[in-house]
Image: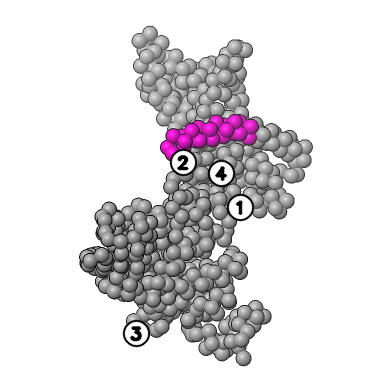
Amino acid sequence: MKKMALSAPKIEIFSQKEMVIFKPQGLWAAPTTKEAMPLCEDILTKDFPNRLIFDLSHLEGFDTAGVWLLQRTIQALKQKGYRVDIQNGSEVFFTLSSRVDADKPSFEKINEPHSLFAERLISLGKTSIEVAYLSRDLITFLGQVTIGIIHTFLHPRRLHFTSLVAHMERFGVHAIPIIVMMTTGLGLVLAYQGEEQLRRFGAEIYTINLVAISMVREVGILITAILVAGRTGSAITAQIGIMKINQEIDALNALGLSPMEVLIIPRILALIFVMPLIAFVSDLAGLLGGGIMVMLSLDVSPQLYIHRIGEAITIGGFWVGIIKAPLFGAIIGVVSCFEGMRVEGTAESVGICTTRSVVEGIFLVTIADALLSIFFVRIGI
Amino acid sequence: MEQKHPIISIRDLTTQMGSQIIHNHLDLDIFQGEIFGIVGGSGAGKSVLMSAILGLIPIKHGTITVLGKRIGSIERIMKLHLQSHWGVLFQGGALFSSLTIGENVQIPMKDMEGMPEDLAREMALIKLKMVGLREEDFFKYPSELSGGMVKRAALARALAVDPKILFLDEPTAGLDPISAAAFDELILTLRATLNLTVVMVTHDLDSIRRLCDRIAVLVDKHAIVGTLKSLLNNHHPWIHDYFHGIRGQIALAGIME
């Protein structure tokens, strides 16, 4: 039984007239199966006289793996029609061997359940059905959220106000540094590249218009939404997902609290409320970045820059940007909560759903932005 | 069962969680081949003690020696080597949720270089059946199993390569009485055949009575060690309440006079 005294497993074979004696030696245990297995397979390929004996007197040590290895060899020999006996096995060996024998695998079932082709076909079918269910579930969820939000407006007291404010702080205030950094940089780059091109037409002063309009109408809000989807959407999905695995969602339900009311509505509302605010901050940061570049390279005074911006951006243009923010917030919120509720049991599933939440969030935001862009231009704002 | 050299030896152990001292200069010896129970009230540090022996938490003071190697002072690789000599059943099962039950049980074997794949799979099946699961469960994921089945699968993983030392954290909690009894028998068989040393944290008085050679009661940040009989005569208030409470009286009827 000592695993420490490692001596490699061997089988000595003594041929006598009309019978063969096998003497397994050394340690027959899980760590030495690498050496032991080929010995056994070797035996199975050879032909012997009808009577075989396994003499276990020289066995130094064994564990369940070793016992099973001997047993499956003997079993296979018996199936080939040999008469096999075991001699000199210790009492411990037989105790273990009868235990293993009781639990030995039935060989028919241990093969892989399906062939590779069938596996692919099954997975194709599963995916198709999954997509159908997914669409249905997303629409159902959207409906539930809508009802939930209407309900909250009709009964404002049911709103979890503390939670809403806490989420607004976490989703909004804490996101400001990274958003300011990113859009300022973007403003700088936009102004630099725009000026390079416009200079060729002698219209470099229009860099200011370029920066102002693109930032305020499109880029500011889009960058904000992408950042929020990556930063907040993933956090929401992971958090709700883990809560689901820990049965916290079940606990809420069992306590008569609706997860929709307690978890989902506050998060979605927080995103809807906070998105216009961070989008505004992001606009300002973008204009600041653009301004720094314009002032440095075009020798424009700050007063003039601000004046030109005022001319470039109409009130309508400003609102076109800001009005999209709550919508994007709602998209990110609904998608991330939905994906969070779809987490099932495993750690892997949290990873998959979180990835999906971010990807779907950004995808849907981009589509919505494109559609709105066309819409606003068509109606002439 | 006791031999001279303890397989696990704890000297002067002090552990701390945050600002709270869990164990204060605790001494403990566990010998080869015995089934050693650890009991104690909630928060007495049963699981912490097990984590300390496994090297999962830092030790503030003292030494723990397992199989002649000092935990905490040895290199990480040595620790890994040691780990293939012990099997651990965590309280919640701690099965890897992205692997099937069969793959979970095969993990310790994969660690063992060169174990033939067929054999590893058959061994996994044998272990699963040993702990009372069915062959169909091989391809299931942990999230598809009930709590008791997760526990059994985790036990199968702990037993996968016939460890020298088996650590069990609340092994019978969540099992029905029939499975719990079968579990007790399984442990006894394995001990008899493989000379297993078992360290179990448990509250199951039936298991304690059936299995444990010696018991450590964690009270007042120390361990009071004894056989079941000697502990029954201990006058420490907590120990007295533990064994002589109503549940204790029912479970241990016949031993007590």
Q: Which mark is residue A343?
A: 4
Indicate which disc, 1 or 2, sits on the residue closer to the N terminus.
2
Q: Secondary structure at mark 1?
A: loop
Observer-nearest of A142 and A63: A63
Q: Which residue is mark 3?
A: B4
Mark 2 closeness class: few <14, some 14–19, many ≥20 residues within 10 Å = few
Mark 1 closeness class: few <14, some 14–19, many ≥20 residues within 10 Å = few
Percent of width and height locating residue B27: 42, 81
Q: Which residues are magenta?
A: A114-138
Horizontally, residue B107 falls left or right of residue B114, namely right
- The chain ID associated with circle 4 is A
Q: Amino acid at mark 3?
A: Lys
Question: Residue B254 is drawn in which quadrant?
Answer: bottom right
Q: Name the image quarter holding the C terminus of chain B.
A: bottom right
- The chain ID associated with circle 1 is A
| Mark whose residue sits in front, 1 or 3 | 3
Q: Main secondary structure of the magenta part?
A: helix
Q: Secondary structure at mark 4?
A: loop
Q: Which residue is mark 2?
A: A114
Task: Compute the Cα span from label 1 to label 2.
Answer: 33 Å
- The chain ID associated with circle 2 is A
Q: Which mark is residue A247?
A: 1
Q: Secondary structure at mark 3?
A: loop
Can residue A254 be seen at all in this image of the molecule?
Answer: yes
Task: Compute the Cα span from label 1 to label 3.
Answer: 48 Å
